[in-house]
Amino acid sequence: MFAHLREDIASVLERDPAARSKWEVLTCYPGVHALLFHRLAHAFWGNGLRWLARAVSQLGRWFTGIEIHPGATLGRRVFIDHGMGVVIGETAEVGDDCTIYQGVTLGGTSLYRGTKRHPTLGRGVVVGAGAKVLGGFAVGDGAKIGSNAVVVKPVPAGATAVGNPARILDPGRDEAREAKAEQMGFSAYGVTRNMDDPLAQAIHALIDHAVETDRRLECVLKELQARGIEAGNAAECRDNFNPQSVSKIVD
C-alpha cells in the first residue's frame, strides 16, 4: 500500500507543474485521496464484502468529489488531476500511468449485469476534462481523448479522438490540410474546430479536395517529365485562388 502511495505521489510531482512538495500532494490532492479510498473499497469488494465496499466508496466520493465504483480496476501511477465530477464505472479498467482530468466519465451503455459495460484504458492514456468514454470497448495504449469528447467506439493505440461523437484525427491529412490552407492565404481552422458546424465541414471538404487535386497533378507532371515531356510545374498549372472571397463568405 505504501509503495503504491509513493508511486502516486511521484507521478503527481512528475506530471503536475503546480505540485511543489510530497507533503502538499499527500494532503491537498483529491485524486490521491480517491485512489486510497478506492484501493480499500476494491479490497473489500474482492473479498465479497460488497456493502462495506460501497460504503467506503461513497465516503471517498463525499470527501473528494470523485466517484469510483469499488469493482473498477485501476493500474499503478494513475493520476486524477483536480478530479471533481470524475465517474468510473464498475467494469472499467484503467491501465498504468493514465491521466484523467476533471469531469471525465468512464461509463456504460448496457443495462445487463455480468457484462463488460465500461471501457478499458490502456497504458498511458490521457482523458481530457469533461470527456465521456461510454461502452465496453478498449482505448489503446498512449491514446489521447480530447476535452469534452464523447467516445462510443474503440480508439487505436497512440491515436487522438476529439469531438461529439468523437472522430479519430488523421495527422497526415490534417498536416496536408493546414499546409494547403496556409498556401491559400488563410486557415480554415481559424474559422472553427467544431466539425459539427456545416460551414466548417464545407470549407474542410474544399481544402481536402484541393489537396487531393494538387497531389494528382504532381503525379501527372512527374509522369510527363519521365516521358521527356516538359509541362511546367504544378504551381503554374493551379487555378488562381482568392482567399479574400472565402473570407467574405465566412464573415
Image (cartoon, helix red, strand yellow):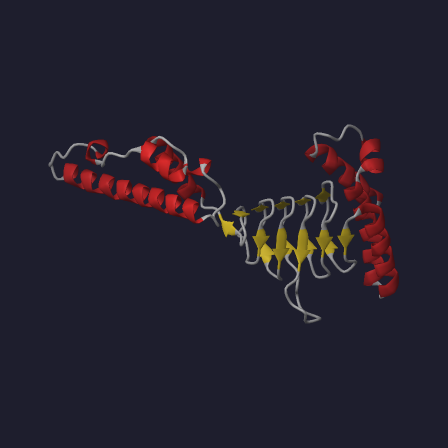
Quadrant housing residue 100: top right
Horizontal and vertical percent position of residue 126 = 62, 44
Which one is in front, 46 or 35? 35
Q: Image point 38% across, 43% down: which residue? A: 203
Quadrant where the C terminus sits is top left
Q: Taking 32 as reference, is 215 left or right?
A: left
Which one is in front, 60 or 47? 60
Q: Image point 23% across, 41% down: which residue? A: 217
Horizontal and vertical percent position of residue 95 = 67, 50
Instruction: From this view, report whether residue 47 is shown above or below residue 234.
Output: below
Q: Image point 73% across, 30% down: which residue? A: 18
Q: Is residue 49 visible?
A: no
Residue occupying the far left of the picture: 229
Horizontal and vertical percent position of residue 49 = 87, 64
Q: Taking 10 as reference, is 152 left or right?
A: left
Q: Is residue 149 visible?
A: yes
Q: Taking 16 as reference, is 167 left or right?
A: left
Q: Image point 71% across, 71% down: which residue? A: 113
Residue occupying the far top of the picture: 20
Q: Total number of numbered labels?
A: 0
Which one is in front, 32 or 235? 235
